[in-house]
């Protein structure tokens, strides 16, 4: 094995771990539990601890799709060399670190995607327009869809003619039905991905669309019934448990999505390096996210929880349901997506339903949107410029 290649891979690996730490300290570690912290349901430090555990689990079991898209799906015709990978990761992590330092949620997906495209184009690669269109559609629609769903849920939950033991149970059942069809790396045969629904179908010997719908409905009804019973006997405690469960699911989804931004650029290097599997890379990235969540996330959690809206448990639930749904769609499509964008837009939607303009800060929102756009453009330019300045990478 080429020693130079190994040394370059190790260097790129350290850059990837740094990126994973920054992700855990920023978007992945902060956004999933920010609504719960804002609702005074869980402390900031405990939220950081829990989100790290679930983020690691999501990275290992759901991280392959986005990792593949980042590593091999954004640029055609070339494979990023080790120097290009290091440049991508340092640019993305550096811009994210600035966001953590200033308290503004710079989008990791924007910085890494922009830097990969910039470096790839400078190396002579060709744009993959079909993937760019898919990513662009998801990025543009996310704040509108997330905000609209959160607004609708937050408008219904306080209504006297819709008892919360019913409305919360229906929402929980919906999430449960979706969860039954989420792909996990450990459920499929021979190392492939599989779902709870497909596993149950295989076990009972009924594999059809009707069976899949039946399993999904059964899971949804079971979870809805449990939540109905819990909320009915203890309203405050039931809402708290639902909120914490949703936060955990969003943290899990964040790990599955965001780990690809840290380890995806390493995948082209594996083609020339024997003995290192994609799963090992995902475990390493998940560990970096976990440590980042434990050590660096509290600052961003506090910023999101306090600066965007004064959240109660109902508005927090309204924000987390669309966050989970959008995140899982993005993972299924293999689209890198910003959890800042997902959760912040949902927080704004839920806040607008209850408090109107007084519940949100227009200045903060505009600055955040500006940071998202600028981070993508700056990362692309920096990625392209680094290759031009250092053509031997």
Image: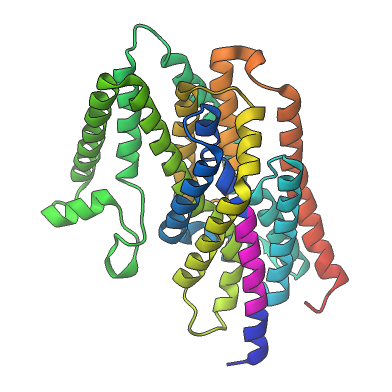
Q: Is residue 144 visible?
A: no
When asked about the image quadrant of residue 303, the answer is top right
Q: Where are the magenta residues, as a range?
A: 10-22
In the image, residue 260 lies at what x, y percent? 55, 59
Q: Name the residue at the left extreme.
A: 204
| Chief SS of the magenta region | helix
Q: Can residue 87 be seen in this view?
A: yes
Report the front residue among 146 and 75.
146
Horizontal side of residue 256 vs 115, given as left or right = left
In the image, residue 150 lies at what x, y percent? 50, 25
Report the front residue among 387 and 243.
243
Horizontal side of residue 4 vs 122, given as left or right = left
Report the front residue among 297 and 9.
297
Report the front residue among 310 and 281.
310
Which image quarter holds the N terminus? bottom right
Q: Is residue 355 above or below residue 296?
A: above
The colour mode here is rainbow
In the image, residue 341 lies at what x, y percent? 61, 38
Residue at image position (33%, 31%) is 172
Q: How many numbered discs sit on the rendered protein? A: 0
Q: In this view, does 111 lie above or below 186?
A: above
- Say if the magenta span includes residue 165: no
Q: Name the residue at the top extreme.
A: 161
Q: Is residue 270 above or below residue 167?
A: below
Residue at image position (37%, 31%) is 242
Q: Name the residue at the right extreme.
A: 389
């Amino acid at each position: 094995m080429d020693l130079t290649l190994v040394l370059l891979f190790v260097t790129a690996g350290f850059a990837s771990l740094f990126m994973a730490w920054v992700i855990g300290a920023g978007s992945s570690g902060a956004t999933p539990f920010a609504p719960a912290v804002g609702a005074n349901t869980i402390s900031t430090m405990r939220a950081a601890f829990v989100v790290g555990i679930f983020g690691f689990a999501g990275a290992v079991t759901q991280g392959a799709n986005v990792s593949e898209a980042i590593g091999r799906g954004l640029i055609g015709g070339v494979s990023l060399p080790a120097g290009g990978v290091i440049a991508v990761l340092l640019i993305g992590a550096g811009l994210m670190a600035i966001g953590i330092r200033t308290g503004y949620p710079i989008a990791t997906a924007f910085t890494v995607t922009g830097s990969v495209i910039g470096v790839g184009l400078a190396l002579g690669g060709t744009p993959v327009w079909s993937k760019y269109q898919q990513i662009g559609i998801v990025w543009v629609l996310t704040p509108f869809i997330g905000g609209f769903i959160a607004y609708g849920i937050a408008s219904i939950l306080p209504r006297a003619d819709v008892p919360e033991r019913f409305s919360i149970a229906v929402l929980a059942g919906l999430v449960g039905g979706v969860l039954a069809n989420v792909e996990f790396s450990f459920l499929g045969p021979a190392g492939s991905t599989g779902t709870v629904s497909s596993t149950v179908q295989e076990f009972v010997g009924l594999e059809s669309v009707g069976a899949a719908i039946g399993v999904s409905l059964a899971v949804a009804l079971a979870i809805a019934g449990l939540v109905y019973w819990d909320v009915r006997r203890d309203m405050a405690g039931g809402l708290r448990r639902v909120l914490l469960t949703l936060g955990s699911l969003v943290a899990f989804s964040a790990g599955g999505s965001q780990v690809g931004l840290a380890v995806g650029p390493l995948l082209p290097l594996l083609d020339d390096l024997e003995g290192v599997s994609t799963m090992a890379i995902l475990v390493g990235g998940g560990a970096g996210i976990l440590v980042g969540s434990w050590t660096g996330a509290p600052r961003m959690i506090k910023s999101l929880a306090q600066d965007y809206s004064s959240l109660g448990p109902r508005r927090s639930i309204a924000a987390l349901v669309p966050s989970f749904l959008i995140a899982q769609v993005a993972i299924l499509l293999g689209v890198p997506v910003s959890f800042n964008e997902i959760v912040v837009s949902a927080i704004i939607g839920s806040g607008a339903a209850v408090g109107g303009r007084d519940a949100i800060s227009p200045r903060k929102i505009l600055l955040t949107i500006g940071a998202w756009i600028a981070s993508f453009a700056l990362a692309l330019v920096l990625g392209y410029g680094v290759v031009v300045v250092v053509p031997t990478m």
